[in-house]
Amino acid sequence: MSDSNTTEFTNPSSFILLGIPGLEMAHVWISIPFCAMYAIALLGNFTILLIVRIEPSLHSPMYYFLCMLAVIDLVLSTSTLPKMLSIFWFNSREIDFNACLTQLYFIHSVSVMESGIFVALALDRYVAICDPLRHSTILTNPVVAKIGLTMVMRGSLLILPHPFLARRWPYCRTNVIAHTCCEHLAVVKLACADIRLSSYYGLLVTFLVIGPDVSFITLSYTQILRAIFSLPTKKARLKTFSTCSSHICVILAFYIPCLFSFLTHRFGHNVPQHLHIITANVNLLVPPMLNPIIYGVRTKQIRDRLFQVFSHKGT
């Protein structure tokens, strides 16, 4: 395996994931919170899917979008965590070249899909609060399905060039990736070629996704807050705001680590490498874990139905 790190080649059969360089001695300890986050993400997101399925009163646009978000979070965490834990626990660092490109595609395409679902949730809250009488006629089941399909197709198609471009480049120096997963730039930086096309396209995708999505979400919640503060009583304002607070928490938990990771990766040249990698892992692991927790705790309908399920089992 060590020979493959120095031998010249153009089409590597596999890559070597180092995990978190500089913290190899702490890999086992780092794996404990990572494993806990993965377990919570699996349990929480499957619980959301189960509760929405068995409770007819939750068969509405917001909860359909939450189910889409849960599926996306399951795919995102499962595409990265098992291999990451195998590195930490068993020193199983080798990953097939095609498997690496597949993981690269899923990481970035699913992240774009998740951003799109947050836009859909912001739209749902905007219509529900600012135009409640037309909510059921605007966001019908076919419209919800089309929105979900559009967000999935957007993520799938926008990221599709990433693995194809990565496959084009010759890798003639090393196949060692200083990361826990096959993140896009971590892979293409190994190429002994001009990778500006990959780099510029990655920037283009970021601006095409984050810019419009964050702008729409900000505009939506600005209008929502204006509508909330115009309500006549404090009780009505608090009740309406509580329905949006969970969405705001989830959105911040997704975009803040994402923005920090993007800025440190592009411009934080003096930031230690292990901090780059830990930040990227936080961006991959924390949202899938927090989303079901926040929605489960903050959304009364889900919380009440969950209590009913457990109390029924207790009797």
Image (spheres, rainbow, N blue to C red):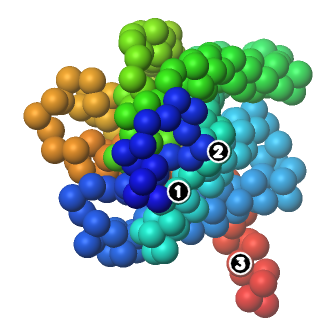
Asked if 75 appears above or below 267 in the picture, the reply is: below
Residues under labels 2 and 1: Cα distance?
Answer: 10 Å
| Closer to the eye: label 1 or 3 | 1
Q: Which residue is mark 1?
A: 94
Q: Quadrant of residue 105?
A: top right
- Mark 2 and mark 3 in contact (Cβ < 8 Å)? no
Q: Which residue is mark 2?
A: 99
Query: Residue 30: x, y in percent?
Result: 34, 68
| Closer to the eye: label 3 or 2 | 2
- Report whether residue 258 is seen: no
Secondary structure, mark 2, is: helix
Asked if 164 appears above or below 45 in the picture, the reply is: above
Secondary structure, mark 3, is: helix
Residues under labels 3 and 2: Cα distance?
Answer: 40 Å
Residue nearest the observer in this picture, 309 or 192: 192
Q: Which mark is residue 310?
A: 3
Asked if 96 appears above or below 255 in the picture, the reply is: below
Which residue lies at the image location 34% right of the left edge and 69% below the top edge?
A: 27
Q: Amino acid at mark 3?
A: Phe
Mark earlier in primary sequence (1, 3): 1
Mark earlier in primary sequence (2, 1): 1
Q: Amino acid at mark 2?
A: Ala
Residues under labels 1 and 3: Cα distance?
Answer: 43 Å
Residue nearest the observer in this picture, 111 or 176: 176
